[in-house]
Image (spheres, rainbow, N blue to C red):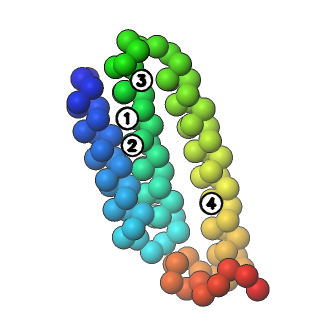
Amino acid sequence: MSLPALLVVSAALFGVGVYGALSQQTFVMIMMGLELMLSGAMLAAVALWAGATGGNPKGQLLTVVAMTVMAVEAAMGFALVINIYRIRRAEMTEKIKRLRG
């Protein structure tokens, strides 16, 4: 694919992620929106790196590291969501008045 096409797909992923993160009320859907935003940003970074350096694999390595960080972030986020659900029985953001106590 060409660079402009990849950037359009990246912007679409990021836009869908922003909409998903801001319009949903459940924790899982908000986290899915955040993951889509990060995926769109990584796709743009890889596309720009490949276009600027002629396919240098350093950009791909950076993306693999970022994907690893995303996986850890998602695991920790889901662990927090599960604990909030177990303690307060709240799956919606509106049901939590405060997180302490």
**Tag 2: Cα neighbours inside 10 Å, few (<14), some, or many (≥20)?**
many
Is label 4 or label 3 in front? 3
Placement of 51 over or under 70, stated as above or below: above
Q: Nearer the viewer, mark 4 or mark 2?
A: 2
What type is the residue that disc 4 sits on? Answer: Phe
Which one is earlier in the sequence, the residue at label 3 or at label 1? 1
Q: Nearer the viewer, residue 56 or 52?
A: 52
Q: Measuring 51% from the left and 84% from the top, which residue is drawn there? A: 94
Considering the numbered disc 3 on the image, is that residue within a helix, a strand or a loop? Answer: helix
Residue 78, disc: 4
The first of marks 1 and 4 along the sequence is 1
**Residues at marks 2 and 3 touching, judged by CB atoms closer than 8 Å:** no
- The secondary structure type at the circle numbered 2 is helix
Q: CA distance from mark 1 to mark 4?
A: 26 Å
In the depicted structure, whether residue 40 falls above or below residue 79: above
The Cα–Cα distance between marks 3 and 1, rounded to whole angstroms, is: 8 Å
Q: Which residue is mark 1?
A: 44
Q: Which mark is residue 40?
A: 2
Secondary structure under badge 4?
helix
Type of the residue with mark 1: Ala
Numbered disc 1: secondary structure: helix
